[in-house]
Image (spheres, coloured by chain):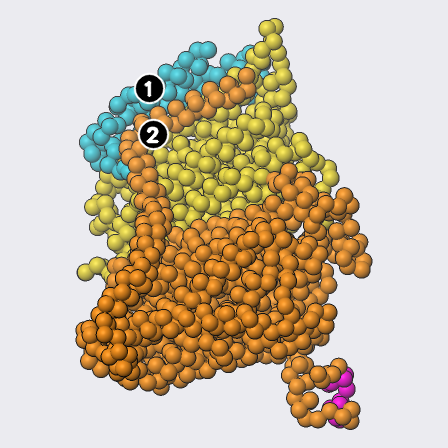
Chain colours: A orange, B yellow, C cyan
């Protein structure tokens, strides 16, 4: 390990070399030293958001007159600019000396931030417009702008024949700006602004090709589920304000005794609430730090009852659980978890680059980001953690099972996204925030690659997305095939690729972590996770085999597919490379920084250490989550995970490549000997069909048709819409148009009021 | 009999109303000298100018010390000054809209603007009235002016029908309120709100020989009658039924003025009356009454708007729904009052946080009023821009189909309408979002958790019908042979101003909230 | 008491009468009932406020009557009837 403490700016380069450091050391230290002072970096964070916003404005207003090439340039250029700025921010936050100011307590290291002043306020409620980038936000920034740029680039070719290109790029840029606001905002309010903004852009982009009436309903579904989620989010925020207000009125200085100067910390926190309002993440972090568990007469604890305000009489622990569950509702809406996942598969009606960017890589991970951002609150409520984990586990398995029976390439990928998001929620629920986030990053690469690959396939096959009508693309679209195969391996969990490590770190965490109060939960979720891993391997292999292997289907729309152009291939190549290279984040080889824990950790865990440090400290205190793992490399778990993935892959390969009935009885050359050997081939075929494919399909059918279509779609979404509309229509007839009946209603209401008032006062 | 002495300090609050009235008189007189074919665009601009001047004076008044003026018949506080500001903004914008609207119909006359300004003067005075008869007279000034404005267009049956319903029901409600005021006067012997509050308590405590409370019936009946009169003006369910018909029948600029100015003035007067009298009568009664009204108004308003295809009517129901959210704020005021017994508002302030919850609610209400005014006028302004005289009699002038394909035909108008719809739905980054956050947050803090949940769900349902307009504009092809009305610079100026305001106050609400926060005593009693 | 009775009669009239003009008259009745109440209480208490109020109310009622009658005439012109049941084209 190089000691960079003597590196520039404290010493000159010559002195540094005189200390025996070589040029390699200089380079390493240069990269660990911020190129900008903290203030300068922080106060220019707004530019990251402003660039794509400006791009959206230019594309939207002048796009038609500028022409195609210029619009492409503006749209891609603005995102690329943001990407470069994000890289600089990454460089800055890698330096320990980079600090973000914190009004509520000690400054944050490894972060930059800036408070641009009061945004709005009313009485004792105040919200500042502040941006902050720490390691978590910075990684999101890079994912959003990096993958966002690639997808913009891809779209220039994909949308080459569409006349609404300027509108499309304006929306896309607007989306990027909103998503950047979501991750850069340092308060729940600003996060919510981004949250709504991405929802709105997603809504606009789903309905981009509005000729199809079917898409109107898809949009509506996305709309209703997201509104339910938003409702949870807002209510949770309001409860948070009330809780913090009550806490500050009630808590004695002892609550802040974890810091050296308890009274000073307490007054600083109060001062911070006064000057910056209760909804910024820094306030929540200080609050979480000051909130111990158990009973302690000298402090306010999770068990204490709230003494003032509207929540009077409930304990802090219960309110926190309620807040987190409401946030879970919000996150479930955005990140497509049970029961609000239904909109995501329908959202595939939009253009494919949109599915890749919004519905796979970025927007849908907002829920995971939210919980990672508030990790310190999550660890305070074991019940909420258990619920999050179970919801994630159930969603993961459920969506994977549904993916079995889907025939549309994008639908399979959509359910797969839901399922992978379930994995991330499982990780959050088990307290493995870094693993959840690692999966966000790796998933962004391989899922974007898969979606864009699917888009390339559709592009080359006259918009045919049905996997039964494809096949044999391996020979006709070599490059797409190669990248799709790599990404499939990544999501399946083939060993050296990124998906294996991210998924396995989640499963490993589920295996070793235990919620103290709900010991069986994570174990149960672990089984769900293992089953999902097998299912993932199965349906992804099925997708891959049907689309790329074998012979070209007879009822294909065009006799020969054509490979896509250079822009699409370049993007696919880069993303496939990313799916492999992201592995560097996941292989555990680094020492724990503080040294008091044995074993090794993945670079991502190390990198996110400052972000989740508070959560870890809190958990050390409360011991809600207990970790009992072996400290070496988890070879056993790895072996099992790989074995499971292998079984799933092999099974799908075997079933669909060799004995797939829809391809007729055409033998596949590679298996000729085997076919000759099995005399009763036909029975085997039917047997497989009977004992494997049928039941699987049946289960999948049940889930898809009965639960998804009937319960959630019809009763949940359509039912709500139907009921409210019907109710409204019924009430409408009271509006007779007759002035006298209006007056009569008024009179009756008045008399009723008087009677009630007098009766009440008797 | 002594003639009371007034100083300049007494007149500051009525100066805006004076400016508006003076401009109205100038407009009426100037009309005499004009021929039928003369250009009358100046009239609209003169009205706007008057509103700007009056608004500027109101802005100055905001920073003045709150006090009772004109021998206690009126009060000057930031609450009423801000209302004056809102009214001036609303009237100015509505006057701009009216120019194009009336020119298109050959109905532009100075009296129209004069009536608008008289109504505005009534609204501003209503906000500062602190005595029942003053209040009633001002209420009637604004009502009579709006009755006449509603009936302005003589072509077709809708305007006169709307005006008739508005008039009959409005006068009915005014009579109810007046009778209520008479009963309260009977119980206390005064019509001044400040005195009345003190005397009400004494009157209620009086007992007769049999131990009953002789004046209780009188006071409760009077109280509720007054409440019913206000509930009519703010269009609270079940006193809302006139709203859609009148809004539909009235000329659209007048509808804009009604939905924004009239409602804002009525709300301010309502808050003033009930904050003065409510706690004196019974802290529970107004809380329960307003909670019930808020609940009904939010739910019914949104439900009724859902099936509407007529956009103008949909906006009318939406204005009912928004009155519901505001009533939630009013209910929160009394919830705070109720909690006062257990010490939230007691002398121990919340640690480290200055101000009280009540002022949060006031600020929330005022901000919401401003936001709603700007947004609603913009939304009605888009209708003004779109509607054509020929369609009015057919009754489909405001159908959703009129908006189909607007995104490609008139991208500017469509964008503006999108902004208004998002703001009405409470989606960031618009002023509607900030307003809802402030209002609902204050309500939750005051303990109205259940009601706030209903409100948020109702507003979630509301976004559905707002977004439907957006969907029609961007995602439906324009009907064959659809004509786009000609552009008029006054209308477009109003649209630009409202759209810019909606976004600007949404992104940077700071100056407004700072203005509202500057005074410790927002509300003078 | 008389005023209350008058008020109730006016209110009932508004609710049940079919002729717009009569409805209009009933509203005036309600206003005058309020007037009477003011006067009665003022006399009872020997207080001037009520008397003055009555004057204001009379003035306002006159203005209202002017506009109201104009509106009724406009209605009659546009549809040839003042029957309140026929004035309901806008509904739902």
Q: Note whether A316 is above or below A353 in the view shown.
A: above
Residue at 52% x, 50% y is: A326
Name the one closer to the observer, A282 or A707.
A707
Task: For the C terminus of chain A, give its image quadrant.
Answer: top right
- Residue at 25%, 59% (x, y): give it: A213
Q: Which mark is residue A742?
A: 2
**Which contiguous range is marked in magenta?**
A6-17
> Mark 1, residues whose alpha carbon is within 10 Å: few (<14), some, or many (≥20)?
many
Disc ID at residue B447: none
Above or below, A104 relative to B54:
below
Q: Is residue B348 left or right of residue B281?
A: right
Question: Where does residue A222 sit, x and y in percent of width and height?
Answer: 38, 57
**In the image, is A243 to the left or to the right of B301?**
right
**Residue highlighted by disc 1:** C13
Give residue B157's quadrant in the image: top left
Nearer to us of marks 2 and 1 is 2
SS for callout 1: helix
């Amino acid at each position: 390990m190089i000691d960079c403490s003597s590196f520039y700016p404290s010493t000159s380069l010559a002195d540094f070399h005189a200390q025996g450091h070589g040029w390699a050391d200089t380079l390493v230290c240069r990269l660990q030293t911020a190129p900008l002072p903290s203030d300068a970096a922080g106060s220019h964070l707004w530019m990251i958001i402003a660039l794509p916003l400006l791009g959206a404005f230019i594309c939207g207003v002048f796009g038609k007159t500028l022409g195609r090439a210029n619009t492409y340039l503006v749209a891609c250029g603005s995102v690329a600019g943001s990407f470069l700025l994000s890289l600089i921010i990454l460089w800055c936050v890698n330096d320990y000396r980079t600090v973000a100011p914190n009004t509520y307590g000690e400054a944050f290291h490894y972060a930059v931030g800036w408070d641009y002043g009061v945004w709005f306020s009313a009485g004792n409620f105040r919200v500042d417009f502040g941006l902050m980038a720490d390691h978590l936000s910075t990684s999101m920034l890079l994912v959003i702008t990096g993958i966002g740029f690639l997808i913009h680039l891809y779209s220039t070719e994909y949308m080459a024949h569409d006349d609404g290109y300027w509108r499309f790029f304006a929306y896309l840029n607007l989306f990027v700006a909103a998503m950047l606001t979501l991750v850069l905002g340092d308060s729940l309010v600003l996060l919510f602004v981004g949250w709504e903004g991405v929802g709105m852009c997603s809504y606009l982009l789903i309905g981009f090709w509005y000729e199809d009436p079917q898409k109107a309903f898809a949009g509506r579904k996305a709309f209703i589920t997201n509104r339910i989620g938003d409702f949870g989010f807002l209510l949770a925020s309001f409860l948070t304000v009330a809780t913090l207000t009550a806490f500050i009125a009630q808590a004695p200085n002892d609550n802040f005794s974890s810091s050296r100067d308890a009274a000073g910390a307490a007054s600083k926190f109060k001062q911070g609430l006064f000057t910056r309002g209760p909804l910024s993440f820094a306030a929540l972090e200080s609050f979480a730090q000051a909130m111990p568990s158990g009973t302690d007469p000298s402090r306010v604890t999770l068990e204490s009852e709230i003494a003032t305000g509207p929540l009077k009489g409930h304990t802090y622990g219960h309110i926190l659980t309620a807040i987190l569950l409401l946030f879970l509702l919000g996150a479930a809406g955005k990140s497509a978890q049970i029961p609000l996942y239904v909109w995501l598969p329908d959202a595939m009606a939009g253009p494919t680059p949109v599915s890749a960017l919004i519905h796979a890589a970025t927007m849908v991970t907002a829920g995971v980001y939210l919980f990672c951002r508030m990790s310190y609150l999550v660890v305070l409520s074991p019940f909420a953690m258990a619920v999050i984990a179970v919801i994630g586990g159930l969603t993961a398995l459920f969506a994977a099972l549904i993916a079995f029976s889907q025939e549309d390439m994008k639908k399979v990928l959509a359910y797969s996204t839901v399922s992978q998001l379930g994995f991330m929620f499982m990780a959050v629920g088990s307290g493995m925030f870094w693993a959840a986030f690692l999966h966000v990053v790796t998933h962004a690469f391989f899922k974007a690659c898969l979606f864009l690959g699917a888009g390339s396939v559709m592009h080359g096959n006259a918009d045919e997305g049905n996997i039964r009508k494809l096949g044999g693309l391996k020979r006709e679209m070599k490059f797409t095939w190669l990248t799709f195969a790599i990404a499939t391996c990544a999501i399946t969990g083939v060993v050296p690729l990124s998906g294996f490590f991210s998924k396995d770190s989640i499963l490993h965490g589920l295996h070793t972590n235990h919620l103290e109060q709900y010991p069986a939960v994570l174990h149960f979720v672990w089984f769900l996770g293992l089953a999902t891993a097998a299912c993932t391997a199965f349906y992804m292999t099925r997708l891959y085999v049907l689309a790329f292997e074998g012979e070209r289907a007879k009822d294909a729309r065009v006799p020969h597919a054509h490979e896509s152009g250079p822009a699409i291939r370049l993007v696919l190549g880069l993303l496939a490379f990313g799916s492999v290279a992201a592995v560097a984040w996941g292989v555990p080889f680094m020492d724990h920084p503080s040294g008091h824990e044995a074993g090794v950790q993945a670079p991502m865990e190390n990198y996110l250490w400052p972000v989740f440090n508070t959560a870890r400290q809190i958990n050390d205190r409360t011991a809600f989550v207990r970790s009992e793992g072996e400290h070496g490399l988890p070879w056993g778990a790895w072996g099992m995970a790989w074995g499971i993935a292998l079984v799933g892959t092999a099974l799908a390969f075997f079933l669909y490549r060799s004995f797939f009935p829809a391809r007729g009885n055409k033998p596949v050359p590679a298996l000729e000997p085997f076919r000759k050997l099995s005399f009763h081939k036909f029975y085997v075929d039917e047997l497989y069909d009977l004992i494997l494919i049928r039941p699987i399909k049946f289960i999948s059918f049940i889930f898809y048709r009965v639960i998804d279509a009937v319960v959630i779609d019809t009763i949940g979404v359509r039912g709500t819409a139907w009921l409210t509309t019907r109710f409204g229509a019924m009430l409408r007839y009271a509006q007779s148009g007759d002035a006298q009946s209006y007056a009569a209603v008024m009179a009756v209401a008045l008399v009723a009021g008087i009677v009630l008032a007098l009766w009440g006062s008797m | 009999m002594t003639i009371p002495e007034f100083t300049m300090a007494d007149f500051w609050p009525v100066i805006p109303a004076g400016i508006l009235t003076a401009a109205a008189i100038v407009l009426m007189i100037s009309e005499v000298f004009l021929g039928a074919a003369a250009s009358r665009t100046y009239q609209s601009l003169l009205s706007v100018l008057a509103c700007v001047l009056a608004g500027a004076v109101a802005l100055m008044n905001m920073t003045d010390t709150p006090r009772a003026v004109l021998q206690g018949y009126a009060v000057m506080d930031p609450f009423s000054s801000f209302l004056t500001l809102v009214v001036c903004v609303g009237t100015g914008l509505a006057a701009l809209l009216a120019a194009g609207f009336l020119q298109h119909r050959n109905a532009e006359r100075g009296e129209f603007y004069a009536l608008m300004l008289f109504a505005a003067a009534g609204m501003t005075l209503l906000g500062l009235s602190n005595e029942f008869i003053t209040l009633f007279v001002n209420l009637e000034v604004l009502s009579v002016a709006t009755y006449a404005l509603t009936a302005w267009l003589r072509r077709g049956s809708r305007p006169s029908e709307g005006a008739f319903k508005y008039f009959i029901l409005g006068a009915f409600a005014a009579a109810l309120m007046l009778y209520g005021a008479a009963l309260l006067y009977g119980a206390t012997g005064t019509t001044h709100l400040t005195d009345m509050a003190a005397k009400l308590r004494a009157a209620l405590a009086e007992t007769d020989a049999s131990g009953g409370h002789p004046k209780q019936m009188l006071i409760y009946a009077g109280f509720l009658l007054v409440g019913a009169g206000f509930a009519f003006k703010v269009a609270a369910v079940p006193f809302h039924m006139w709203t859609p018909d009148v809004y539909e029948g009235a000329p659209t600029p007048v509808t804009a003025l009604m939905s924004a100015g009239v409602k804002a003035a009525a709300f301010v007067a309502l808050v003033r009356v009930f904050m003065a009298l409510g706690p004196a009568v019974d802290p529970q009664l107004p809380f329960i009454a307003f909670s019930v009204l808020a609940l009904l108004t939010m739910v019914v308003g949104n439900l009724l708007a859902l099936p509407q295809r007529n956009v103008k009517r949909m906006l009318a129901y939406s204005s009912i729904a928004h009155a519901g959210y505001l009533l939630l704020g009013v209910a929160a005021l009394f919830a705070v009052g109720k909690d006062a017994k257990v010490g939230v508002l007691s002398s121990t302030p919340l640690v480290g946080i200055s101000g009280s919850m009540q002022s949060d609610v006031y600020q929330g209400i005022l901000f919401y009023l401003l936001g709603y005014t700007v947004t609603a006028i913009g939304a009605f302004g888009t209708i003004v821009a779109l509607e054509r005289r020929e369609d009015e009699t057919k009754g489909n002038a405001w159908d959703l189909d009129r908006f189909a394909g607007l995104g490609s035909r008139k991208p500017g108008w469509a964008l503006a309408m999108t902004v208004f719809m998002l703001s009405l739905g409470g989606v960031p980054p618009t002023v509607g979002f900030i307003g809802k956050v402030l209002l609902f947050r204050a309500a939750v803090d005051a303990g109205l958790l259940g009601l706030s949940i209903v409100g948020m769900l109702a507003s979630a349902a509301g976004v559905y019908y707002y977004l439907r307009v957006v969907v029609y504009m961007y995602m439906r092809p324009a009907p064959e042979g659809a004509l786009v009305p000609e552009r008029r610079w006054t209308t477009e100026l109003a649209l630009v101003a409202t759209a810019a305001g909606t976004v600007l106050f949404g992104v940077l609400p700071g100056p407004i909230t700072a203005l509202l926060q500057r005074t410790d005593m927002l509300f003078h009693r | 008491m008389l005023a209350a009775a008058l008020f109730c009669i006016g209110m009932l009239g508004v609710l049940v009468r079919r002729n717009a003009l009569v409805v209009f008259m009933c509203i005036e009745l309600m206003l005058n009932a309020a007037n009477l109440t003011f006067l009665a209480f003022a006399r009872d208490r020997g207080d001037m406020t009520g008397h003055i109020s009555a004057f204001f109310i009379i003035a306002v009622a006159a203005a209202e009557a002017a506009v109201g009658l104009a509106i009724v005439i406009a209605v009659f012109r546009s549809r040839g009837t003042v029957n309140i049941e026929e004035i309901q084209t806008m509904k739902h």
